[in-house]
Amino acid sequence: MLDGKTAFVTGGSRGIGAAIVKRLAAAGARVTFTYNSSPDAARAVAEAAGNGAEAVKLDLSDAEAVAAAVRAFPKLDILVNNAGVFELAPAAETTLAVYDRLFAVNVRAVVAAVLEAAKTMGRGGRIITIGSVNGEAAAFPGVAFYAASKGAVRMLTKGWARDLGGRGITVNVV
């Protein structure tokens, strides 16, 4: 049902991302996915997914690199922002560097990808971001930065859904 569609998935070498890559490829999409530190795992996912799935090493903390990766697609039908980092950061024991890292990957990379995808994605396009229940509540100590990053993505997604819905592009956070 996705024959002829192109998909870009961040963080596709393990866990939820790997399952997404495999499912999209099984449905007929041509999938490119990113990984950061596991080339062997990425290669295994690409082989298991089949259908020409391709793994690309990408540092998601580099927003310009993320934008360039999305810009490389002449036509993109599906964007899945799956990659994220989690780190407990109790207020009295953490640093702004931890905040910067969490927001660079969990928020800024998502923003960079969506802004680029929105420029060329057409009617029927799909933008899906993997969120967290912590985007609605800081459920335990040390989760404030992570929860704030996921809350930011949740609210950005609501705004983008309104911005892009009129063009026939569906934007969701799961």
Image: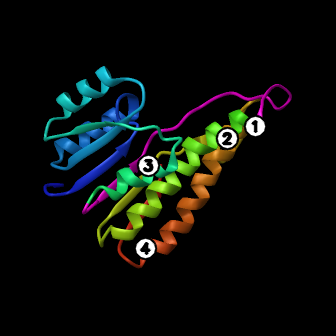
- Horizontally, residue 148 falls left or right of residue 31, namely right
Q: Position of residue 23 (x, y in %)?
A: 25, 41
Q: Position of residue 11 (x, y in %)?
A: 40, 37
- Disc number at residue 66? 3
Question: Dot 1 surroundings within 10 Å: few (below 14), some, or many (20 or more)?
Answer: few
Chain-order first, disc 4 or disc 3: 3
Residue to which mark 2 is pinned: 100
Q: Quick check: is 90 in the magenta stretch?
A: yes
Q: Amino acid at mark 2?
A: Asp
Q: Amino acid at mark 1?
A: Leu
- Disc number at residue 96? 1
Describe the element under mark 1 as helix, strand or loop.
Answer: helix
Chain-order first, disc 2 or disc 4: 2
Q: Is residue 67 above or below residue 115?
A: above
Q: Is residue 25 above or below residue 126?
A: above
- Mark 4 and mark 3: Cα distance apart in space: 23 Å
Q: Quadrant of the N terminus?
A: bottom left
Residue at image coords 44%, 49%: 66
Q: Amino acid at mark 4?
A: Gly
- Mark 3 and mark 2: Cα distance apart in space: 16 Å
Residue to which mark 4 is pinned: 165
For the residues bearing labels 2 and 1, Cβ distance under 8 angstroms: yes
- Mark 2 and mark 4: Cα distance apart in space: 31 Å
Chain-order first, disc 3 or disc 2: 3
Q: Quick check: is 138 in the magenta stretch?
A: no
Q: Nearest the camera: 48 or 98?
A: 98
State the count of labels.
Answer: 4
Question: Dot 2 surroundings within 10 Å: few (below 14), some, or many (20 or more)?
Answer: some
**Magenta-drawn segment:** 74-95
